[in-house]
Amino acid sequence: MPEETIHESEGSRTRQALATYFRRLANAFGRGEPAPVDDAGTVTVDPGDEPAFEVEVEREDGTVSLDLSMEFDEADGEVDADAAASKAAFELYEDSAEQWRWRLVHDNGNIIADGGEGYSEKRDARNGLDSVKRNAPGAHVVDTEKDEGVPETGGSDATFELFEDNAGKWRWRLVHDNGNIIADGGQGYASKRNATTGLRSVKANAPGAAVEETED
């Protein structure tokens, strides 16, 4: 059978973006699930239980290359070039006060995240949701009730904060390194477990979610 290229991408990435990408692979492999190899999550690879793996570092004419190669029999694993990108979609809309907002709506109809504020320009609202798409997958989760410190390194410029509000409800917010809250769950949960499940849904579904302009 002739060689077939199923997916290929190239370009520059920051160290943080690389960490996010490899963490997505590691988390999926660790759970025994197919791993998304593209940013939208539309191409996934399941390498089976014990694929061949090779690491090669080369230097030539002042350039260093690091090649990571994995190989497995199709019978032992699976490649899906038409995987579902997300079980949610971003809705971009103008509210009754003529402010632009976004919300992340799950296929079941639940709003699982929103920006928490309105923007005077559609472009700013879009930049806000794009920041969530970039930063949610690799963001660390910090339980503020345990006074945990924020890890110094990671694959994101933001951190999920899990906390209990004054009414005894558990909530989460996604806080950028600049201190801005770029997303929250918009609701309180009866338990920490439910709040954690909610933010994990955002981590999983935000990267590949389509953006749709709707009416409020």
Image (cartoon, rainbow, N blue to C red):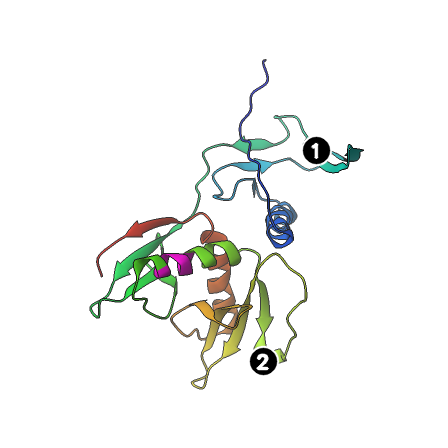
Quadrant location, the C terminus: bottom left
Q: How crowded is mark 2: few (under 14 residues within 10 Å), some or many (20 or more)?
A: few
Q: Position of residue 203 (x, y in %)?
A: 50, 57
Q: Position of residue 119 (x, y in %)?
A: 32, 66
Among numbered discs 1 and 2, the one appearing first in the sequence: 1
| Circle count | 2
Q: Mark 1 points at which residue?
A: 69
The label shown at residue 145 is: 2
Q: Residue at image x 68%, y 37%?
A: 49
Name the one closer to the observer, 102 or 46. Answer: 102
Say which element carries label 1: strand
Q: Is residue 44 left or right of residue 60?
A: left
Spatial distance from mark 1 to mark 2, Cα to Cα? 42 Å
**51 in relation to 164, above or below:** above
- Verify whether residue 127 appears in magenta: yes
SS assignment for the magenta stretch, majority: helix
**52 in relation to 107, above or below:** above
Q: Is residue 197 left or right of residue 120?
A: right
Name the one closer to the observer, 52 or 127. Answer: 127
Q: Residue at image x 52%, y 77%?
A: 163
Circle nearer the viewer, 1 or 2? 1
Residue 159: image quadrant is: bottom right
Q: What residue type is labelled 1?
A: Ser
State whether residue 108 appears in this view: no
Quadrant location, the N terminus: top right
Q: What residue type is labelled 2?
A: Glu
Q: What stretch is highlighted in magenta?
A: 124-129
Q: Residue at image x 58%, y 80%?
A: 145
**64 in relation to 16, above or below:** above
- Verify whether residue 162 appears in magenta: no
Q: Where is residue 134 in the image (x, y as percent from the top left)?
A: 50, 54
State whether residue 145 appears in this view: yes
